[in-house]
Image (cartoon, grey):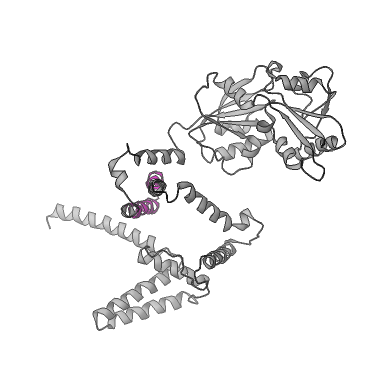
Amino acid sequence: MPPELIVVGLGPGDPDLWTTAAHRALTATGDVWLRDLATPSAAHLPATARRHALPADDEDAASTLLALARRGDTVVYATPGHPAIDDPLWAALRRRANAASPVTLRLIPGLGLAAAALTAVMPDTSGGDYQVVAAATLAGRASPRLDVDTLAVVTGLRAEQLAGVAHALANVYPADHGLTLVTGLDTPIPTVAPTTLAALAGASVPGESALVVAPLAQPGAVTSLEEVMATLLSPDGCPWDREQTHASLRPYLLEETYEVLAALDAGDIVKLPEELGDLLLQIAFHSQIATRDGEFQLADVVRSITAKLIRRHPHVFGEVSVADADEVTRNWEKLKAVERAEAGQRATDPFAGIALALPALSRAQEMQRRATRFGFHWPDRAAAWARFEATLAEWRTAATGEARAHAFGDALFALVTVAQVDGLDAESALREANHRFAARFARWQAESLETGD
């Protein structure tokens, strides 16, 4: 029979909350291993228990415990809270227990520290949803992956993790968002201290600590938008929304896209979140229609783009090294070529994947960008201008309407080339020119009214 390692959950600091199984395991052995001999939990151990300290590093601590168990010793490891929820050492033990010489892990659960933290902050938590995340996990993420509309509890908080936790939370919560820091969860009476996200990095976290994060004041999670759309498309929802199809929504998708571009062109950061929200609505609308009709779900949309971003950024999520942004672009094109080949598209087609529905100017611009990446480009600005002037001459001398239209198109395409060489975005430049003309025309109208002309 494989040797056994007993992992005991001590719950919060009050020994009266230990389970009967925990009491039995702690009194049946003479040796108990802990992460910190100075914690209040250690002081409450039976007098017969010989206390031993483990290394601070999770992997080193796991090596110590597993080596003792494989030697045939009766090994008891005690930890505050519920070991499988509150202690990252449990994950290391699980991962390594089935090595060449297996060790059986016996878990004795304890009252989770998340429940203790919630009880300290709000004694009556009946009927409320909440989510739990370990501080060690959260501190290593760029974004917390939390539902911002649901109460969250961050457990196992340590001083060295505060900056990482604050950084992750700042990606989805405002700086003044209210938090509650609960410290001393391994003592009979924890300390509760309101704070803010902005002040979190400098907080003090003695003993076992947790952070209770309130939901946003107004719904802000994509899941909340998904629920609203599901309600609108339900039998008791909105008659207009229920009648919509992918095809009928197409004009709105185009309109909202251009509204976003207009806000970007104007540099209107106040307006931009609203316009991006309108565009996100179109994505959620199409996804919910597809969900209703059994085609796909919003999760499939997110899964697709997430996988694509990871796949196309091996220099971030893999082991590929790049020197600069130009090399990133070259790698990106190589990866896209592989994807096109797997999809059955011609590997030599540089324009595969450029949407036919793009405005002609934007499409010309993207085609020229792709061609440049394949080595087709004008040697310098003078050559690009010469080509543009040649197309103007052809336009001037064209004899028929068809020839003039052909030459005009070539002139526009050549002008996009000049913009490309000059590092300009032709589509944005033309939109801004439209705005300037509209402003000038409005002034002309006003002056005409004043003069009576």
Q: Is residue 257 magenta?
A: yes
Tell which of 230 and 272 is nearer to you.
230
**Residue 412, placed above or below residue 296:** below
Tell which of 281 and 227 is nearer to you.
227
Quadrant assignment, res 7: top right
Quarter of the image with the C terminus in it: bottom left
Q: Is residue 161 magenta?
A: no
Where does residue 269 sit, x and y in percent of width and height? Answer: 41, 46
Where does residue 392 sit, x and y in percent of width and height? Answer: 33, 78
- Residue drawn where x is 56% and y is 63% of the image: 332
Quarter of the image with the N terminus in it: top right
Tell which of 387 and 236 is nearer to you.
236
Where does residue 5 sit, x and y in percent of width and height? Answer: 79, 32
* Residue 298 showing in the rendered view: yes
**Residue 136, placed above or below residue 279:** above
Report the magenta residues as a range.
252-278
- Residue drawn where x is 11% and y is 55% of the image: 452
**Residue 123, placed above or below residue 253:** above
- Residue drawn where x is 83% and y is 21% of the image: 49
Quadrant assignment, res 93: top right
In the picture, measured across the screen, residue 370 lies left or right of residue 97, that is left
